[in-house]
Image (cartoon, rainbow, N blue to C red):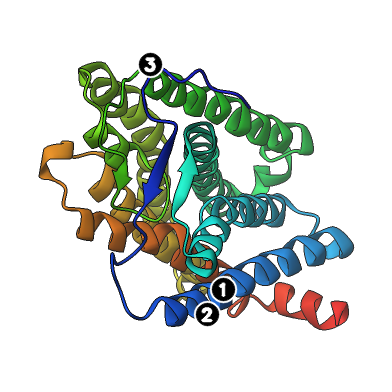
Amino acid sequence: MGWKNQTTISAFLLLGLFEGSENQQLLFWLFLFMYLVTVIGNLLIIIAVASNTHLHTPMYFFLANLSFADINFISTTVPKMLVNIQTQNNSISYSDCLTQLYFFIMFGTVDEFLLATMAYDRYVAICYPLHYRMVMSPQHCFLLISLTWVVNVLHSLLHTLLMNELVFCTKNEIPHFFCDLNPLLKLSCSDIFINELMILTIGGLAGLTPFFCIIISYVYIVLAIIRIPSAEGKQKAFSTCSSHLSVVSLFFGTVFGVYFSPSSHHSAHSDIIASVMYTVVIPMMNPFIYTLRNRDMKAALRRLF
């Protein structure tokens, strides 16, 4: 993917997690370990779902897509950071920076839409169990996944093209470990009003739409669970949602804190900590969260090994 450089800058400098840190090798091995755990864990979920016919259901179909998105999401940022640490060269070209930004936004928002789709799946399963097979048919599931990818490809392209129109003059140091929207906007010497407006409106819509879908789904789920007469039935129904709910809380909490407040209110340190949470920690935790309490998934992994 090529980008037309509107600026006098040909490259940016990624300052990394902690500028001037003496523990760069420790960071390298720590993030390499988390990266490998994330890729292997999510890849095992994809293989287990694909190879086991008992897991050919909407819930596991969406989970496999989430695992695929998580592998790509973390691969957009962490490998470049690891290379920078090892080579002690923090440079990233202008075109590579915008390409990284494009895929980062795309896979990040795909995660949000997939979490909303999974919440909708749980809503139908708990509130309308007799109609579940009809509502969550293969055609319906494929349509939901297709819309998720198409919408977010276009959404990411919008923000990247707007970023490409900005002018960057002399400052080229990004106080981050990847090319993100807010740090890049702070470096621009042109008017960023349109960019911030699009983040708060189009970006806000892309973030809030799946978020409110999740909230509405869980309101109906809770109301349905309350009506279940037995305590055992309530516990069983809630257990199918608890893993998903914990991931949603972590993911949306950090994302909203970083992107949906004015850039002037951000500190580089807080942005980096929040970014590590949703770009590295949460994708790494997802395979454990979704499998440790899931008998079908654990059985499928045992058969796989």
Which tag, 2 or 3, sits closer to the chain's start? Answer: 2
Q: Secondary structure at mark 2?
A: helix
What is the C-alpha distance between the residues marked 1 and 2?
A: 5 Å
Secondary structure of the residue carrying tag 1 is helix
Q: Amino acid at mark 2?
A: Trp
Residue located at (21% from left, 54% from top): 268
- The three-letter amino acid code for the residue at tag 1 is Leu
In this view of the protein, which residue sits in the foreground, 280 or 8? 8
Label 1, label 3: how many angstroms apart (C-alpha)?
34 Å
Report how far apart the C-alphas of labels 2 and 3 lie in the structure.
37 Å
Q: Position of residue 111 (x, y in %)?
A: 52, 47
| SS assignment at label 3 | loop
* Residue 227 shows in this picture: no
Task: Judge by depth and name the residue closer to the eye, 249 or 177.
Answer: 177
Residue 277 visible within the image: yes
Task: Give the position of the N terminus as an image quadrant.
Answer: top right
* Residue 46 point in image, percent of width and height: 75, 60
Instruction: Say which residue label 3 marks.
Output: 165
- In front here: 221 or 284? 284
Residue 29, numbered label: 2
Circle 3 Cα neighbour tier, 10 Å, few/some/many (<14 / 14–19 / ≥20)? some
272 with respect to 135 (left or right): left
The answer to whether mark 1 and mark 2 are in CB contact below 8 A is yes
> What x and y, as percent, mark residue 131?
66, 42
- Sequence-wise, which precedes: disc 1 or disc 3? 1
Residue position marked by numbered label 1 in the rendering: 32
Q: Looking at the image, is 74 positioned above or below residue 213?
A: below
Quadrant location of the C terminus in the rendered image:
bottom right
Q: Which mark is residue 270?
A: none
In terms of image quadrants, where is residue 133?
A: top right
Residue located 81% across and 55% down the image: 56
Callout 3 amino acid? Glu
